[in-house]
Image (spheres, helix red, strand yellow):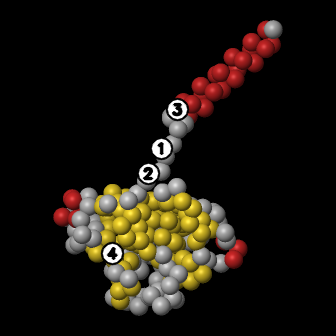
Amino acid sequence: MKRLSLCAILVMVFAAFVACQSGGAAPEPMPTFDIVKSWTFEDKAVWPATLSSETSYAGITATSMGILIGPIPPAQLPKTATINGKTIDLTTRLQLPKNGNRSTGALKIPMEGPCTLVFACLSSGDSAERELILSNGKKDIFKKFLQFVTMKEANIVFYKYTAEDHASGDGNLYVYTNDLGGAITLYYIGIAK
């Protein structure tokens, strides 16, 4: 009986320790997004294998050369993203080059005002996280490290673009990575109300 009581106490202490380490709270559930516009990169008539500098594709402009589009390599399939509770099977990727900035290796998306931006993305490397950066044209407004490309489920990253972001910028959102080690991969971009 003493041994059973001691085991029960140890289990409770361990559970309390784990709860303290994790903050005691469950992770917040992914919000639901009211997507009004979205982009994937499968349509070869719209999205060539290499984007040309200062050319618009379905409303998104490539700021320079070096942005590549192509099929996801077979070793990385299946690849999925879950948005609004629905799983999307991903087949095509857009790679933003390493060492980018607002004018080199970025996507430029015209913004009309406050919204929520939603990305399905991963690092392009299999051994290093890489940073997704969003800029309003004047300053970086968001940064997020992305998991390895070997993950089967893409990271869903969202950012609430505010009236302040819009007023203090040039009316565009720039998406890039300045990582010196490698690229990042985008599978989906959405704009929500």
Give the mark nearest the N terminus, 1 or 4: 1
Residue at horizontal 70 percent and vertical 74 percent from the top: 75
Which label sits in the foreground, 3 or 1?
1
According to the picture, the residue beneath numbered tag 4 turns out to be: 109
Give the mark nearest the N terminus, 3 or 4: 3
According to the picture, the residue beneath numbered tag 2 turns out to be: 31
Secondary structure of the residue carrying tag 4 is strand
Secondary structure of the residue carrying tag 3 is loop
Whole-percent x, y for residue 111 in the image: 27, 71
According to the picture, the residue beneath numbered tag 1 turns out to be: 28
Give the mark nearest the N terminus, 3 or 2: 3
Spatial distance from mark 3 to mark 4, Cα to Cα?
39 Å
Asked if disc 3 and disc 4 are in contact, CB closer than 8 Å, the reply is no
Spatial distance from mark 3 to mark 2, Cα to Cα?
21 Å
Left or right: 151, with 64 as reference point: right
Q: Amino acid at mark 3?
A: Gly
Residue 105 in sight: yes
Which label sits in the foreground, 3 or 2?
2
Spatial distance from mark 3 to mark 1, Cα to Cα?
12 Å
Quarter occupied by the N terminus? top right
Left or right: 188, with 2 as reference point: left
Q: In the rendered image, which quarter is residue 168 located in?
A: bottom left
Spatial distance from mark 2 to mark 1, Cα to Cα?
9 Å
Q: Amino acid at mark 1?
A: Glu
According to the picture, the residue beneath numbered tag 3 turns out to be: 24
Residue 82 vertical placement versus 125 (above, below)? above
